[in-house]
């Protein structure tokens, strides 16, 4: 299931625990646990919320730099990308 989760995150689509749980036919709690495990093993990381990819960002609602927004942007580390190749 760890590899399946990495594959879903690598697609760059919806990262929500709810959506991932639905796609992988499991619970949100399992997804959260798997994400923590992948992060501990250095396959997955949370993007720095202080760095924004938006040009001239004002902290819009869809941006992870918005402190009111509880969204975390997950990405694969180099180790995670190697695992999937």
Image (cartoon, rainbow, N blue to C red):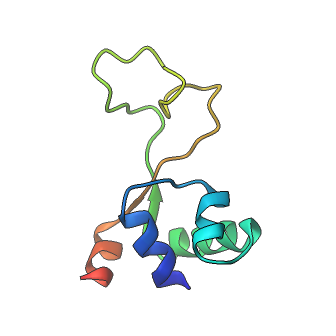
Q: Based on the displayed image, in which of its 4 quarters is residue 53 positioned? A: top left
The mark tally for this picture is 0
Q: Give the residue displayed 41% in from the left and 74% down from the top.
A: 7
Between 76 and 60, the one lying in front of the other is: 60
| Left/right of residue 33 with respect to residue 73 in the rendered view | right
Position of 45 relative to 67 (above/below):
below
Q: Give the residue displayed 72% in from the left and 65% down from the top.
A: 28
| Left/right of residue 51 with respect to residue 64 in the rendered view | left
Between 82 and 11, the one lying in front of the other is: 11
| Left/right of residue 70 with respect to residue 8 in the rendered view | right
The image quadrant where one finds the N terminus is bottom right
Q: Position of residue 51 (x, y in %)?
A: 38, 33
Q: Position of residue 78 (x, y in %)?
A: 28, 69
Q: Give the residue displayed 48% in from the left and 37% down from the top.
A: 49
Position of 57 relative to 63 (above/below):
above
Q: Position of residue 48 (x, y in %)?
A: 44, 42
Position of 62 relative to 79 (above/below):
above
Q: Give the residue displayed 61% in from the left and 59% down from the top.
A: 19
Q: Position of residue 69 (x, y in %)?
A: 62, 31
Res. 42 visible in picture: no
Res. 76 visible in picture: yes
Between 34 and 25, the one lying in front of the other is: 25
Q: Based on the displayed image, in which of its 4 quarters is residue 85 positioned? A: bottom left
């Amino acid at each position: 299931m760890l590899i399946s989760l990495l594959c879903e995150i690598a697609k760059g689509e919806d990262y929500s625990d709810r959506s991932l749980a639905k796609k992988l036919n499991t619970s949100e709690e399992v997804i959260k646990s798997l994400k923590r495990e992948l992060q501990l093993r250095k396959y997955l990381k949370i993007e720095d919320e202080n760095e924004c990819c938006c040009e001239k960002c004002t902290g819009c609602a869809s941006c992870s730099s918005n402190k009111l927004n509880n969204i975390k942007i997950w990405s694969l580390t180099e180790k995670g990308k190697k695992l999937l190749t």
